[in-house]
């Protein structure tokens, strides 16, 4: 490695330090207790209100509409658990984990420990074929390299995965429950997490099958869990899908690794609320512990700095972000369309 290369690498290494200094000077890493007090209250009210409505409506097909409302409530609880995992709400890990397990395991049937481990690995190496669990070729393939090596279900549906993407998201809620249950033996607090997780499953199934006839109960579960998975999947899909997929050959510094693999979704306060602030994916990946309401304020600072540093910064409209993701999936599956 020559002297010029060493100097260039050193300059890149300082890029994030300069940006971080600007963000700190703007006070954007400070906690927002007032915001989270209001948000937690509203999400809790939606969750509790949904179950009260479920009990009130009872054995009527209108209960399927309640299932749709509860799907939104479950997804919003999951987004709150996401912020807790990143210690955006509390400074201490103890409070973050306690409320995270209450929201995740007990509230929606998703293991907090399993999800946090998975999500931490994603943040460390976003869109990296070898290290990011979110782009492992399980059912879908994320690059033509993966498609060429695909086996099993991924090989069967990979050629048409773009068309099947949203229908498959209807199964994501069920997948989260199954993956959580499988992961319990390996999580740090497996006894506590197991009690909370299986307690949720037992209470959920008891409530549904005691209050509803069997056919209606199954229909409610399908609507509730299907829309929950669809909504939750749609909050994550536009963020990285369609962005560069990295391999061992790619050596990027922290700033470029996070910015080049992420896409922001433009929109107003309703998009912010709908996606839980994850529409500012670039800012979130650069500063994972930044409180959600500060991401909007950080956005122009980060974009401006990226222009100074010559780092491409991508944002797209709400619909276009999904179109880009689907085009990427279609292109990635090309080797499987023979």
Image: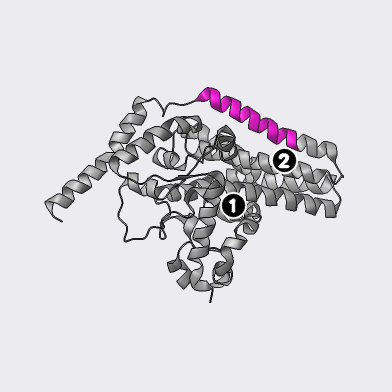
Mark positioned earlier in the residue sequence (1 or 2): 2
Can the viewer see residue 92 in this picture? no
> Most prominent secondary structure in the magenta stretch?
helix
Mark pair 1, 2: CA separation: 23 Å
x, y percent for residue 332: 48, 64
Foreground of the two, 94 or 148? 148
Residue 50 appears at what percent x and percent y? 74, 37
Residue farthest to the bottom, as pictured: 338
Q: Residues within 10 Å of mark 1 (few under 14, many from 20)?
A: many
Q: Going 61% across and 37% down the picture, which residue do you hit? A: 102
What span is in magenta?
32-50
- Residue that appears at 79% across and 39% down: 54
Marks counted in the figure total: 2
Name the spot of residue 319 as percent of width and height, x first.
Answer: 57, 47
Q: Is residue 214 left or right of 246 when viewed as pictured? A: right
For label 2, count other residues whose C-alpha is less than 10 Å away and answer few (under 14), some (14-19) or many (20+).
Answer: many
Up-down relation of residue 75 to residue 323 (above or below): above
Q: Is residue 64 left or right of residue 123?
A: right
| Label 1 sits on residue | 180
Secondary structure of the residue carrying tag 2 is helix
In the picture, measured across the screen, residue 123 lies left or right of residue 223, that is left
Q: Is residue 234 above or below residue 293?
A: below
Q: Read off the residue under disc 2.
A: 69
């Amino acid at each position: 490695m020559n002297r010029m290369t060493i100097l260039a690498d050193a300059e890149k290494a300082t890029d994030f330090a300069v940006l971080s200094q600007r963000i700190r000077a703007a006070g954007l890493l400070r906690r927002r207790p007032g915001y989270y007090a209001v948000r937690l209250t509203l999400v809790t009210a939606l969750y509790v209100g949904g179950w009260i409505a479920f009990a009130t409506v009872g054995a009527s097909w209108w209960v399927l509409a309640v299932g749709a409302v509860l799907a939104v409530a479950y997804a919003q609880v999951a987004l709150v658990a996401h912020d807790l995992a990143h210690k955006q709400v509390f400074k201490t890990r103890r409070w973050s984990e306690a409320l995270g397990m209450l929201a995740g395991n007990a509230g929606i049937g998703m293991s907090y420990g399993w999800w946090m481990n998975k999500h931490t690995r994603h943040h460390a190496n976003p869109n990296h074929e070898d290290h990011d669990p979110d782009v492992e070729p399980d059912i879908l393939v994320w690059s033509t390299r993966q498609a060429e090596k695909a086996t099993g279900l991924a090989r069967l549906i990979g050629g048409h995965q773009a068309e099947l993407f949203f229908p498959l998201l209807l199964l994501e809620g069920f997948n989260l429950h199954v993956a959580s249950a499988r992961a319990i033996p390996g999580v740090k607090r497996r006894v506590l997490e197991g009690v909370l997780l299986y307690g949720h499953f037992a209470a959920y199934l008891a409530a549904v099958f005691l209050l509803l006839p069997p056919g209606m109960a199954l229909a409610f579960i399908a609507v509730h869990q299907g829309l929950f998975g669809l909504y939750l999947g749609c909050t994550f899909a536009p963020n990285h899908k369609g962005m560069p997929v990295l391999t061992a050959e790619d050596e990027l510094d922290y700033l470029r690794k996070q910015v080049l693999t992420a896409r922001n979704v433009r929109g107003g306060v309703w998009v912010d609320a709908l996606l839980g602030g994850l529409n500012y994916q670039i800012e979130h990946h650069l500063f994972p512990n930044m409180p959600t309401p500060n991401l909007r304020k950080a956005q122009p600072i980060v974009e401006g700095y990226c222009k100074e540093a010559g780092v491409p910064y991508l944002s797209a409209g709400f619909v276009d972000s999904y179109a880009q993701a689907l085009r990427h999936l279609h292109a990635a599956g090309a080797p499987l369309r023979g």
